[in-house]
Amino acid sequence: MNYEFLAVVINSTIRMTTPVLYAALGAALCSRAWIFNIALEGQMLMGAFVAILVNHFTENIVISVFAGAAAGVAVSALVAVLQVKFNAADMIVGTAINLLVLSLTTFLLFIIFNTKGAYANPAMRGLPRISLPIIRDIPFLGTVLSNLTILDYTAFFLAFVLFVFLFKTVPGFHLMAVGINRKAVISQGFHADRIQMLTVMFSGLLCGLGGVVLSLGQVTLYTEGMTAGRGFIALAANSLGQRHPIGVLFSSFFFGSVQAIGNALQGTVIRSQLTMALPYIVTVLALVFTSGRFSLRKKTQL
């Protein structure tokens, strides 16, 4: 192992982190507003599919990004109506929407593109890579920051923006107040339902951007179920990060590094089945760790 290989792994970690980070930040906002949104997977998948669909017909990357984000918002609006307005069970709603979106995108892939499994077209345009003028010539740092897109940089910047929003602004305090004491918020004349629904819809926008990164950032194609459980990994990152935007940033980076290391280990003496399963194994272990720590803290308080 040398410094150049380490730089490549860190660069891969950043790219693996981005889609998970978008969804995890959305999960953190929902958690702060006391909404358990497990439909992140479906929102990401719809964003990825619609981004490719619009890119195919327009060949315009800007319109494709906005369309993917809007698709995530559309799915999250359904989640908001069912869970907030009609008080439906979050597990049932999330599971149903994840399965619905997976089936719908598979169906539309065949109907629109007349193909199964995956779709790619050389005419489609992916997210442009940003080349920083001076930094790109620095040996180690230039490799770390190579082949990144505007959405990669935006995801990390957004974590700090959401930190400021939640803990330094009045609307952020209102959002967290809904999660702490909903009745008290209503008694002060605020619309708790509206705050929760807008929060869920904004989380859908973030998930849609995460899906766009998958289909137009790392590659320029769509495959069935290409989110591959990243929505659930985002839930684990939110839990590990304690619903705090900065904590979520570090936990998402941790999961991204595990996936990057797993990709780097492919082709070695380690079996590929193990390297591919590594992110999911670590996710389960992280959930066990966080739940055990929460139980210990609760016993200590009692």
Image (cartoon, rainbow, N blue to C red):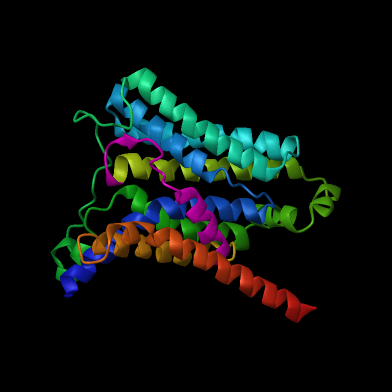
Query: Is 226 in the magenta?
Result: yes
Front residue of this view, candidates 68 and 276? 276
Residue drawn where x is 23% and y is 48% of the image? 129
Quick check: 270 above or below 94? below
Q: Residue at x 20, y 65 (%)?
A: 268
Quarter of the image with the C terminus is bottom right
**Farthest residue in the bottom direction?**
300
Up/down of 43 relative to 107, above or below: below
* Left or right: 188, with 166 as reference point: right
Q: Give percent across and percent down for residue 226.
A: 38, 41
Is residue 194 left or right of 61 when viewed as pictured?
A: right
Write the residue at 51% across / 39% down.
42
Decide if residue 182 is on the left or right side of residue 105.
Answer: right
Query: Which quadrant of the view contains residue 275?
Result: bottom left
Q: Is residue 141 positioned above or below 296 on the image?
A: above
Camera-side residue: 231 or 54? Answer: 231
Residue at image location 41% in from the left, 23% down from the top: 108
Asked where in the image residue 4 lies, by quadrant, the reply is: bottom left
Residue 87 part of the magenta segment: no
The x, y position of residue 257, in whole percent, is 35, 65
Residue 13: tell me if it is visible: no
Q: Position of residue 254 (x, y in %)?
A: 42, 66
Q: Quadrant of residue 252?
A: bottom left
The span picked out in magenta is: 218-240
Q: Is residue 104 visible?
A: yes
Residue 274 in percent (x, y) is at 34, 61
User: In the displayed structure, would residue 297 be above or below residue 258?
Assistant: below
* Image quadrant where one finds the N terminus: bottom left
